[in-house]
Image (spheres, coloured by chain):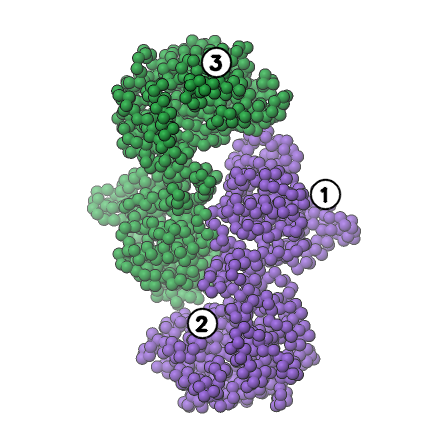
Chain colours: A green, B purple
Amino acid sequence: MINQLQNILKDPKLQPYLYKKRIGLEKESQRVTLSGALAQTNHPKTLGSRTIHPYIQTDFSETQTELITPVFDTEKEALRFLSALNDVLLRSMPEEEMLWPLSMPPALPVDDRDIQIAKLENQGDVNYRRYLAKVYGKRKQMVSGIHYNFEFSPQLIKQMYDLSDQSLLLTEFKSEIYLKVARQYLRYRWLITYFFGASPIAEDHYFIMDRPNEPVRSIRNSSFGYTNRPEIKVSYESLDTYVNDIEHLVDTGALIEAKEFYSSVRLRGSQDLQELAKNGIQYVELRNIDLDPFSTIGINQKTLDSLHLLVLLMLWLPEEEKSVLEREQEGVLKNNTVALEHPLALTIYQEEGNWLLQELDQMIDALNLSDKEKSLAEELKDQFKNPEKTLAGRYVKTLEQTALSNGEWAVSKALDYHHAAYEKPYQLAGYREMELSTQILMFDALQKGLKLEILDEEDQFLKLSRGSHIEYVKNGNMTSKDHYISPLMMENKVVTKKILATEKFSVPNGYEFSSLAEAMNYYPEFESGSIVIKPKSTNFGLGISIFKASVSQDDYQQALEMAFEHDSQVLVEEFLEGTEYRFFVLDGKTKAVLQRVPANVEGDGCHTIAELVANKNENPLRGTNHHTPLEKIALGESEAMVLKTQNLDFSSVPTKGEYIYLRENSNVSTGGDSIDRTDDVAEGYKRIAEDAAKALGAVVCGVDMMIPNIKQASIRESKDYGIIEANFNPMMQMHIYPHQGHSRRLTRDVLDLLFPEL
Amino acid sequence: MINQLQNILKDPKLQPYLYKKRIGLEKESQRVTLSGALAQTNHPKTLGSRTIHPYIQTDFSETQTELITPVFDTEKEALRFLSALNDVLLRSMPEEEMLWPLSMPPALPVDDRDIQIAKLENQGDVNYRRYLAKVYGKRKQMVSGIHYNFEFSPQLIKQMYDLSDQSLLLTEFKSEIYLKVARQYLRYRWLITYFFGASPIAEDHYFIMDRPNEPVRSIRNSSFGYTNRPEIKVSYESLDTYVNDIEHLVDTGALIEAKEFYSSVRLRGSQDLQELAKNGIQYVELRNIDLDPFSTIGINQKTLDSLHLLVLLMLWLPEEEKSVLEREQEGVLKNNTVALEHPLALTIYQEEGNWLLQELDQMIDALNLSDKEKSLAEELKDQFKNPEKTLAGRYVKTLEQTALSNGEWAVSKALDYHHAAYEKPYQLAGYREMELSTQILMFDALQKGLKLEILDEEDQFLKLSRGSHIEYVKNGNMTSKDHYISPLMMENKVVTKKILATEKFSVPNGYEFSSLAEAMNYYPEFESGSIVIKPKSTNFGLGISIFKASVSQDDYQQALEMAFEHDSQVLVEEFLEGTEYRFFVLDGKTKAVLQRVPANVEGDGCHTIAELVANKNENPLRGTNHHTPLEKIALGESEAMVLKTQNLDFSSVPTKGEYIYLRENSNVSTGGDSIDRTDDVAEGYKRIAEDAAKALGAVVCGVDMMIPNIKQASIRESKDYGIIEANFNPMMQMHIYPHQGHSRRLTRDVLDLLFPEL
């Protein structure tokens, strides 16, 4: 049946599913110092227990980190997640450490004992590594790479099965598919080594005796890499032979356990071989991918696309009329040869290579694949003719061009990646378009070892879990911990005020109007007071007017008209004196207090306001469109107007130490500063904010208070404060990365609230 | 100081506060049969315990209901609440009972023993009534009226105090203000009796011996009403004299307790007289208002406005230079005289009346009151000259014109009010502009005796309470019982589906696309299937296309384009066969199952479709703009189109029994029918809906399921159903008032959930 595969694959019914798959990535790297020496530190404590961390582990040595992504439908998603994990790992390590970007390890200690086996909790895991160290030597275990887990879409398999003669059961059919791919991959994997081999040179103390004399395509994929001894032979003829051969090797003591069988292709479906035999193969793990040193995360989209295309080719190609073991042996031989060729040399397997690439073209035609696959095939053909365009070729060319040693270049690359990770620490690689608070929360969740799934990216909707405990989070702090009615209360300023007033909190007196005429009737009441006129439900400071002493009837009317432009309901409230503070209350505790200051610059007596703004805007905390914790100060109409009222313009030069304000509102979104005041504010006010959140039934609550003197003690019934507003989805990033003062890692508090077991 | 009052009142600073007040209303009425006989039934059980009901009580007899509103800032709000209470009372009584619209009771039983004293739980309350029956006779206790509780705005009192010489404390000043109003009111209340007296005639067995020979202005306010014996004298000279006089009367046994002192003005502030003396007067209770039989609820806005104006006049008028008791006596005398004048006769107190109305004009000028008050004053002057325009005057005129007896007319009015209450039972009088579900919930809350406050009407935001237990409700079923994250999940169709799919529920397979190009790539996958194409987040059926068999590439593209017009994200999903049902799940239980049927008419072989629609639309359950549980079927473009596909138009005449559908979608909002199926659907499906709600963490959840056969047993993992959508604020009115089948009173279930102690 499997021989009709080409006909089946060509069936138009398969078209929609041909390119569907599920993939997962694993990536190992060595932790090194900023000068490239193997790190002597332990695996970072901030990453929690390796026993349960689903994504960040250690492989053989304590310094050899391993990142494991969940399974995704697209390469893009897998790469994004891997980027994020890489980012989390980098920023969880001491700032004086970085990740070695090469498959071949950095210069190793002279003394074997200085290579620390991973300090895992499970003694069995440690013993297994001790055994490996003894049998293969610690040095070979220090090599890193990428594992590419690949599954055809279940829909594709099902459609293929439906088109087959159905002489097998579906699970058997599926296993046959993967066995064929595995056999062909083992036979032709030299092509992968040719294109993507990237371990030409080893640093000191890797080789013990023999070594290549000059750069090669892939030390890791050659006999100098970590391979089983030649007598370890496993037949991929059938799932039974595979399972039986490995079991026999284990039974006879040739392998300590099944996972010691280190092949370029592992058949996956269950950890237990008997289970695998019973349930069939679910996917394959391709383990021969070197780290791409040109990529921050060791692999890129194009390589993954090419791998997918070549896997498809393996499925497509008819198998040779030779015994399976014979073909496996040929595969080992050719791969070793190609791995040890010079990166800039043509491979000696020109004929087979050309034939394979021709078959690839034919397959692309026959299967009606898209232009994308066609151009990928063109590139592969080009690289086949021009070895300097392969990964290893580019690698050695780069060393030539930079005149750097392999180690020096690796250090410089690693430093680049290290700097990039720290440049905007509030962002999470792979997810930079999401809301900042969500990015930071995701960082913390990944660091803590929570399982993370993005249910809806646009909506900032996350699923977090640990074991059977599932929590959903939207926009960083909208969770199951709050009752639905609380945010609805806070969304409505009038309701919020009524509830707080009933509970004896100080809130500004005022009225709600639904028509200008009605509001005008109340003019006499407001004439001599200080008032604020605002639309009932805007949140961006739009349509708000403040009169601090008295207000003329005309001004009153004008302000009302403006407010009514923004909402059909307008509030006229007593204006409270003091400075505005945001109290971030979580689960009954004030976790952070922030003062927001309108956009401003401090004069130095020689620069213009425009120059001072430009200078202040260089702070990496400032950006645009909320991709940074603070926004750049604009030089727009509003700012010009505010300056004008002070008889200034952008070219004015303020004196040294003089503060010039460019905005009246203190919103961070219009270039304002944020100053952490958590430790400055009197406890009484914190208590008030906590009690107000409680009155609103809120677990997550941003309470905005006007306070003339934050040092003064206060109680709820006093009048030395006023609650302006309560927010049900308060920003977190401005507390975590304030312009001035301590950072308050509120995202971690949210996680602690959701997962008290952490 | 109190003599400078006119100057103080004229101060411009007072302007904004002059017209501010707080008022509360109480209204008594007798329950009668539809023919006007005193009801023999007990107070309705559905109204719960009278011991704790805050709003609906009984007064002297078991048939004498009493409605009590909370305190409001405006007459309008007080009247709305009173209307609502009246509506709740009427529909909580047996449908064969109504409320007697007159102050004077209906014909009373010949035997006193047939007048049942209210069957209250507290024996003391019963004993008090037995005592009253003994001392005053049961018949006089059967008279009903309105009590008008009036408080000047605290801001007004405060401003007045600030302008006074401040020789008194603020609380003393306040008491003085109310004492003055009380004294003047007692002195001049004959004017109120003149204008608003409305008890000219008594039915049988009210009078025992003496009686007026012809209609009078107000039997209730005359010596024939329920008044204390003449020896009961209390001086309103000061708060002390008031308190001491009453205490003395109680001590000497002249009164059984303080509340037996029945005056037209009661000074209020505390139930306990010593407390009242200590804390001062907070407001006054004016008790001499007859029920206005022309008003459903016994009083209207204009009367309340006039009362307010006259109360202000009492504050304004300088007091006569006579002793307080002398003035009180004069007041009693004049009031009794006016009460017993013929309603169509001019009062004999022309001079004093004209002087008072002149003073009223002067006050209006001096205080710069608005046109509204001026025109009210004009009307009062007009009525003073034309007694037939007073309430009692209109009353006797109406009897003349209708040629009905007093009792016959009262019965016909009562029947009108009774019918009006039952006409649209899904609405709540006073609040007909609010959402139906909220109106029904308010009805149930008032019926159950929960305290109700509307925090924001436009937002349908309610505060319900019982003792210290407070619950907030928005839009009828958004409460503290749901976790915030659940509605957020349900708001997002993709997230909902992912979560349900993970938990093994059957949901339609499909994809989410953010561009037309991306969606077009998937065409081959959908080509031969049945699919639905819809915008990600619309809820009104807009932009949705359904293809039941296969779809051409052009149609597929067109449908996508239409969907993208409504949202930037479009879903293409497997179309599920079957009928759609809405499962309303509350707190883990399926409380109702509804089938919605597209707008349709059943032919009768002689009427056109347009006529059949018009006929069907006459059902009072159908209306427009969601003010009814069902919407009228439109005869618009969409309906014409749907008919056209069936080769029909509005003038076609369907055969007898033929069902013609005018819409494709089954939304109730486009004229669809609702059919209760709660008892028809197999338990398995209910379980599935309950489990789905649980998976979404939802306490309130409307689960929409496609089911081919509702009788068939089913389990979650089966494929004989599909969950289309989950709704976090599911409509309740369509289950409560379905087109067909049983009513499911979901609002009561919501209240039971919120207040399990009920």
Q: Which residue is labeled 1 in the image?
A: B646
Q: Which residue is labeled 3 in the image?
A: A328
Tell me the amino acid under the disc marked 1.
Gln
Q: Which residue is labeled 2 in the image?
A: B21
Q: Are marks 3 and 1 in contact (CB under 8 Å)?
A: no
Q: Residue furthest front?
A: A252
Foreground residue among B42 and B595: B42
Q: Residues within 10 Å of mark 1 (few under 14, many from 20)?
A: few
> Which numbered disc, 2 or 1, marks the residue that appears first in the sequence?
2
Q: Residue at x 33, y 21 (%)?
A: A138
Residue B710 x %, y %: 66, 45
Marked residue chain, label 2:
B
Tell me the amino acid under the disc marked 3.
Glu
Q: Quadrant of the C terminus of chain A?
A: top left
Q: Marks 2/1: CA distance?
A: 64 Å
In front: mark 2 or mark 3?
Answer: 3
Figure quadrant of residue B321 = bottom left
Tell me the amino acid under the disc marked 2.
Lys
Q: Quadrant of the N terminus of chain A?
A: top right
Q: Residue at x 55, y 64 (%)?
A: B448
